[in-house]
Image (cartoon, rainbow, N blue to C red):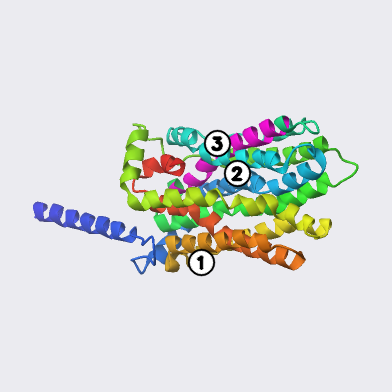
Amino acid sequence: MEILGHYSVAVDDKNAIDQEKDAQVVSIGGAPSLNGAGEHEEEELSGAGFRGWVMIAGAFLIQFCGYGYAAAYGVFQDYYIRYYLPNASPSTISWIGSVNAFMSISMGLIVGVAYDKGYFGSLISALSLFMLSLAKPNQVWQCFLAQGIGMGLGTGLNFVPSVAIASQYFPRRDSSAVAMILITAGSPLGAIIHPIMLNKLLSNPDMSFGTAMRISAGFVTVLLAIACCCMRQRNAPPESPTSVVKVFAKAARDKAFGCMCISLLLFCMAFFYPMFNIQLDSVKHGVREGLAFYFLAIMNAGSFISGLLPTLFVRSIGVVNMVIFSVASTTALIFSMVALKDLASALVITILFGVCVGIFYGLQAPLAVALTEDEAEIGWVFYV
């Protein structure tokens, strides 16, 4: 009887484990394979506890001050070309925003190592903004060091941990995707607030560039300080650090993951163009300056709304399908900028681009996590 009792317990345990594994099977390209996935997702989201939702709030603020601020560079591009750095060519000034965006992404190698060892958090972005306030007119190199290098470095150090940590509080792939979508919604919201704030500050005749930057830097500093206090890792760092050679070798053998990396690399090289130039192009094509100031905010308002839409459709349509739609439509809209000639065309391109690229904002992180088998490698995956 004792043997039969142990056998019965073992069978029950095995069945429970099998059911748990089945519940975690989610189709990347389409609908989930388990009918009750929605109920499990809701249970996990509600069961994450206060600590999990505080983490989401902190990560949201990091996105707000990181990529959200980087997406407002179009304001600086316009201001630098017409007022602050008139002696420099537009292509030279564009290096500031381009290097900022590159540093934000390429810092993943260092951050991946630090995150897998349990370290994250940085106020370098705020410090760099204070340094930018000291830059003198027509001194491109000063703006480049402070905004291009410094802010790019600060944003890059914060981006990977703020997204990857969601998988610790929401280990299921579907609920983790929802949490990441909520976190990355901070980027378009920041890209709504920052352009309006910067345009108002920089267009104030009674305020210098340095004063405007110090006000903006103070705002970012407070939010980043709150965010760093909210961010805590739930799981202990792995005892044996993940080997970079192992991760790269594994990624090279995974055709689906390799295609994703190449496609996202090419896409990220292009989709910053409208954000950097829509305001300046609109002014040069006759759009009233006071109205053009709001184009970046309008674009990113569309991104904010569409960035949250995947939470409703990702389980039925699939992560990959929604990303493909976003990339294809955004690419078409970038080419359509050659037809920008008046207020109507500028407004249509601005709204549609914001809506289409917002889907990509919300799903780039869930796409990478969905193709990652080992949770200990998530930090490295975001770099690759």
Q: In which quarter of the image is residue 245?
A: top left
290 left or right of 326?
right
Asked whether disc 1 touches disc 3, contact meaning CB atoms under 8 Å apart, the reply is no
Residue 88 lies left or right of residue 334; in this view the side is right
Within 10 Å of disc 1 (Cα), the crowding (few <14, some 14-19, many 20+) is: few
Query: Identity of the amino acid at label 1?
Result: Leu
Element carrying mark 1? helix
Measuring from the top left, give residue 319's x and y in whole percent.
44, 60
Please say whether residue 240 is visible from this viewpoint. yes
Q: Is mark 2 on a helix, strand or loop?
A: helix
Where residue 62 is drawn, which disc sits there? 2
Q: Residue 308, image x and y in percent?
A: 56, 61
**158 within the magenta span:** yes
Quarter of the image where the C terminus is located: top left
**Residue type highlighted by circle 3:** Leu
Of label 3 and label 2, which has the lower sequence position? 2
Q: Nearer the viewer, mark 3 or mark 2?
A: 3
| Marks 1 and 3, the one that precedes in the sequence | 3
Magenta-highlighted residues: 142-167
Residue that label 3 marks: 157
Kindly identify which residue carries mark 1.
Answer: 312
Question: In the picture shown, does residue 321 fall above or below 200?
Answer: below
Label 1, label 3: how many angstroms apart (C-alpha)? 30 Å
Q: Name the one closer to the observer, 25 or 284.
A: 284
